[in-house]
């Protein structure tokens, strides 16, 4: 039985004051979250502060990206070992904003995924199509290409230690949401694609939906057979809204 997971991607938002308020509000309501795993991914600068605040709770803390290199002359980068050193256990890999704005290719994403797996971090691998790709009926082709790059680098068994997040790019931050049926179709495709190589891995891997998830649509999305929770953007910046989504996942 796959445990639901809700991960909050705070992106480049927050201050020490606002983040203290946000994480405090989430912690206050965690007793209402019965069976879902909860993870928050702050900006790098605030990870240690959030880790300190959630100590002793069931909240996991992740990063929003990681370098593929282990160490060296890579100004501005953060390595897997550095994240391990501060006891950060998860990391978002291949978010569409990284792919679109910072040139993260499928190959680069695969290398970052490999670095995370090799260092004992849990990757949350993001895949998804642009609006023009969906309109051209290329959704499955795009998602398969993105997954295949990781499998070629790390093998299908690497998904035993990873999470996949399907995020249709056209639904991220736009207010548009894939219908539960549209989302389920892609989640089922992902699971079936993995099952062709390893049915056990396919059955157990958590596949999250991301793309304008809110408390009002979360329960219907999460009720789909192959949707195991969500990677939440804007709604994760409001403690009450985020908690409602976590409760819906449970």
Image (cartoon, rainbow, N blue to C red):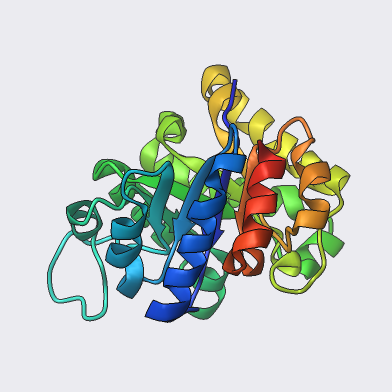
Residue 205 spot, x, y in % from top left: 54, 31
Q: Is residue 142 left or right of residue 179?
A: left
Q: Residue at x 39, y 53 (%)?
A: 61
Q: Is residue 160 left or right of residue 71?
A: right
Quarter of the figure that contains the N terminus: top right
Q: Is residue 169 visible?
A: yes
Q: Residue at x 81, y 60 (%)?
A: 177
Q: Is residue 103 visible?
A: no
Vertical placement of residue 154 versus 105, above or below: above
Q: Residue at x 79, y 44 (%)?
A: 219
Which one is in front, 17 or 112?
Answer: 17
Residue 117 spot, x, y in % from top left: 32, 42
Vertical placement of residue 166 versus 95, above or below: above
Vertical placement of residue 135 versus 156, above or below: below
Residue 68 spot, x, y in % from top left: 29, 60
Quarter of the figure that contains the C terminus: top right
Furthest-left residue in view? 72
Q: Tally the marks.
A: 0
Q: Residue at x 76, y 55 (%)?
A: 215
Q: Is residue 160 left or right of residue 231?
A: left
Residue 65's quadrant in the figure? bottom left
Residue 92's quadrant in the figure? bottom left
Vertical placement of residue 91 versus 9, above or below: above
């Amino acid at each position: 039985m796959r445990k639901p997971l809700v991960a909050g991607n705070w992106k480049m938002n927050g201050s020490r004051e606002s983040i203290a308020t946000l994480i405090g509000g989430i912690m206050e309501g965690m007793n209402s979250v019965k069976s879902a795993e909860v993870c928050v991914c702050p900006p790098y600068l605030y990870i240690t502060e959030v880790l300190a605040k959630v100590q002793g709770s069931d909240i996991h803390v992740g990063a929003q990206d990681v370098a593929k290199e282990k160490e060296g002359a890579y100004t501005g980068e953060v390595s897997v070992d550095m994240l391990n050193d501060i006891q950060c256990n998860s990391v978002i890999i291949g978010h569409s904003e990284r792919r679109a704005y910072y040139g993260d290719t499928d190959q680069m994403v695969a290398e970052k995924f490999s670095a995370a797996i090799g260092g004992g971090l849990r990757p949350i691998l993001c895949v998804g199509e642009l609006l023009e790709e969906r309109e051209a009926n290329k959704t499955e082709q795009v998602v398969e290409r993105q997954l295949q790059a990781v499998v070629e680098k790390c093998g299908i068994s690497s998904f035993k230690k990873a999470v996949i997040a399907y995020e249709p790019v056209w639904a991220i931050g736009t207010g548009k949401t894939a219908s539960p049926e549209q989302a389920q179709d892609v989640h089922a495709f992902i699971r079936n694609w993995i099952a062709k190589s390893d049915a056990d891995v396919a059955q157990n891997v958590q596949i999250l939906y991301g793309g304008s998830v809110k408390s009002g649509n979360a329960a219907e999305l999460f009720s789909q057979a192959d949707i195991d929770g969500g990677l939440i953007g804007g709604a994760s910046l409001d403690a009450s809204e985020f908690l409602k989504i976590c409760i819906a996942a449970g």
